């Protein structure tokens, strides 16, 4: 009887943990973009910057940033009215539309922005110009959110000044 009760409790806890992980994963999906021109138009309409999360598929630091900082902030609505957040994977084989409306390979787009080190966050205006301090890598995960907010505030102020 005690063995069955312990097994039942363990199974219940396992189901709860699995459900929590599924909810967290489902709510933290950052949009992968294929068209920066459309993202920029949306940002222009809202007078906010476009924040591009430059990543690679096999980058463990990219996963950490996505899962620990960006995903939860995105799911909680922390970018709403402040920025259009999108992700560009440099490993993506399909061409993407750049800010100028031209098709370009993601890897080449990253080279244009000198963003080959991942993760990198770029804070861009509607024309694709940098308007905030880029964040490269993760030197201190505990302070990353603070520095991200500083760069976002700076880019948002510049976006509103441009409009």
Image (cartoon, rainbow, N blue to C red):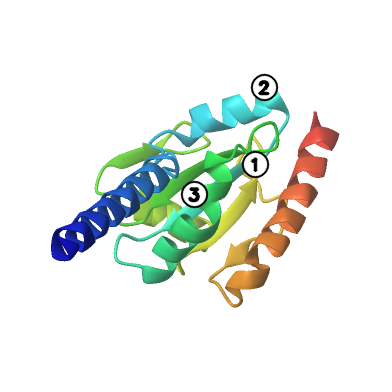
Q: Position of residue 11 (x, y in %)?
A: 21, 55
Task: Identify the residue under disc 2.
Answer: 45
* Labels in figure, total: 3
Secondary structure of the residue carrying tag 1 is loop
**What's the residue at 64%, 33% (across, down)?**
80
Secondary structure of the residue carrying tag 2 is helix
Give the label on residue 14, or none.
Answer: none
Question: In this image, 147 relative to 60: left or right?
Answer: right
> Label 1 crowding class (10 Å Cα cut-off): few <14, some 14-19, many 20+?
few
> Relative to 140, is 121 above or below?
above
**Badge 3 or badge 2: first in the primary sequence:** 2
Task: Identify the residue under disc 3.
Answer: 71
Give the label on residue 78, or none.
Answer: 1
**What's the residue at 67%, 22% (across, down)?**
45
| Figure quadrant of residue 74 | top right
Question: In this image, 93 relative to 39: left or right?
Answer: left
**Badge 3 or badge 1: first in the primary sequence:** 3
Which residue in the rendered view is the most extreme toward the bottom? 139
Of marks 3 and 2, the one in the foreground = 3
Q: Position of residue 123 (x, y in %)?
A: 64, 50
């Amino acid at each position: 009887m005690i063995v069955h009760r312990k097994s039942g409790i363990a199974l219940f806890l396992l189901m709860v943990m699995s459900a929590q992980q599924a909810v967290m994963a489902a709510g933290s999906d950052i949009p992968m973009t294929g068209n920066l021109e459309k993202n920029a138009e949306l940002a222009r309409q809202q007078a906010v910057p476009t924040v591009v999360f430059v990543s690679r598929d096999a980058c463990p630091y990219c996963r950490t940033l996505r899962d620990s900082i960006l995903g939860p902030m995105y799911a909680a609505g922390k970018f709403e009215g402040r920025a259009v957040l999108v992700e560009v994977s440099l490993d993506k084989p399909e061409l993407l539309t750049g800010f100028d409306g031209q098709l370009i390979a993601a890897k080449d787009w990253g080279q244009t922005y000198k963003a080959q080190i991942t993760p990198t966050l770029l804070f861009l205006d509607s024309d694709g110009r940098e308007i905030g301090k880029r964040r490269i890598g993760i030197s201190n995960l505990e302070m990353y959110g603070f520095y991200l907010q500083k760069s976002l505030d700076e880019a948002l102020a510049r976006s509103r000044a441009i409009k």
